[in-house]
Image (cartoon, rainbow, N blue to C red):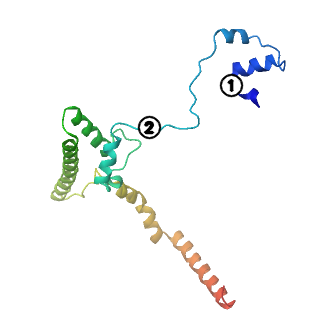
Amino acid sequence: MSFLKGDLLTRTRKLVKGLAKSEPIWLKAMEHAPPATFPCADGKVKRISLPEDVYIKKFFQKHPDSKHEDAIKICGFDPPPARLFGLRVLDLKEQGVSEEEAMAVADMEYRAEKKAKKKAYSRLKQIARLQGKKPPANPYPSAIKEIQAEEREYVHDRFFNPKILEIVQKLKEEKAAEAQDRFRGGGW
């Protein structure tokens, strides 16, 4: 099916030359000013890599639990700590600092920021206790704790909602009846 190869102009020329189609009015105009051609991707998608990706990988090797604690918020504007770490290392390297020192400084800044957040939240709780109020929710929760907070009401429902308890009871009864039938029938 060689007539299918090429762009619109090439295919139309082949059809006209082979007398399969009459020459359209627009063909001459299109030959004088052909449309722009775009490079073909050949079915391969190039991997997008940024300069800081190397340092992000090293960050996650050094702080593997950060993947769960400092999750990427898709609707947020703040970049994740790993990207900040990588950008900081690149920034320090541009200023003439060696790679090892730049990574050490960026790591120290990450740890200090994390420690400051924990200290600020503990201070908030302490102030709330002194005022006799309920401590505020953690403004810097980990991703796992956020998910658990969302699921807490459903977990509570599982044990205390009468409708769900009724469904669970029916399932238990069905399972027990099935086990009895299996036992009476002589096995599997």
Task: Report, in whole angstroms, how far the alpha carbon at label 1 lies from the one at label 2.
Answer: 29 Å
Residue 130 lies, in percent from the top left, at 15, 58
Query: Around disc 1, counting alpha carbons within 10 Å, would you say few (fewer than 14), some (14 to 19), or many (20 or more)?
Result: few
Which label is found at residue 6?
1
Whether 125 is drawn above or below 104: the answer is: below
Q: Nearer the viewer, mark 1 or mark 2?
A: 1
Q: In the image as oriented, which residue stretches furthest toward the right?
A: 19
| Earlier residue among tags 1 and 2 | 1
Residue drawn at 66 percent across, 8 percent down: 32
Residue 2 image-quadrant placement? top right
Residue 141 visible in the shown view: no
In the image, taking residue 45 as reference, residue 130 lies left or right, namely: left
In the image, taking residue 133 as reference, residue 27 lies left or right, namely: right
Residue 9 lies, in percent from the top left, at 70, 18
Residue 167 visible in the shown view: yes
Whether 152 is drawn above or below 188: the answer is: above
In the image, taking residue 150 as reference, residue 102 lies left or right, namely: left
Residue at disc 2, secondary structure: loop
Query: Around disc 2, counting alpha carbons within 10 Å, would you say few (fewer than 14), some (14 to 19), or many (20 or more)?
Result: few
Residue at disc 1, secondary structure: loop
Quadrant the N terminus occupies: top right
Residue drawn at 77 percent across, 13 percent down: 24
Q: Amino acid at mark 1?
A: Gly
Whether 149 is drawn above or below 166: the answer is: above
Task: Report the residue marked by disc 2.
Answer: 48
In the image, taking residue 95 as reference, residue 65 lies left or right, namely: right
Residue 37 lies, in percent from the top left, at 59, 21
Q: Amino acid at mark 2?
A: Ile
Residue 120 lies, in percent from the top left, at 19, 51
Quadrant the C terminus occupies: bottom right
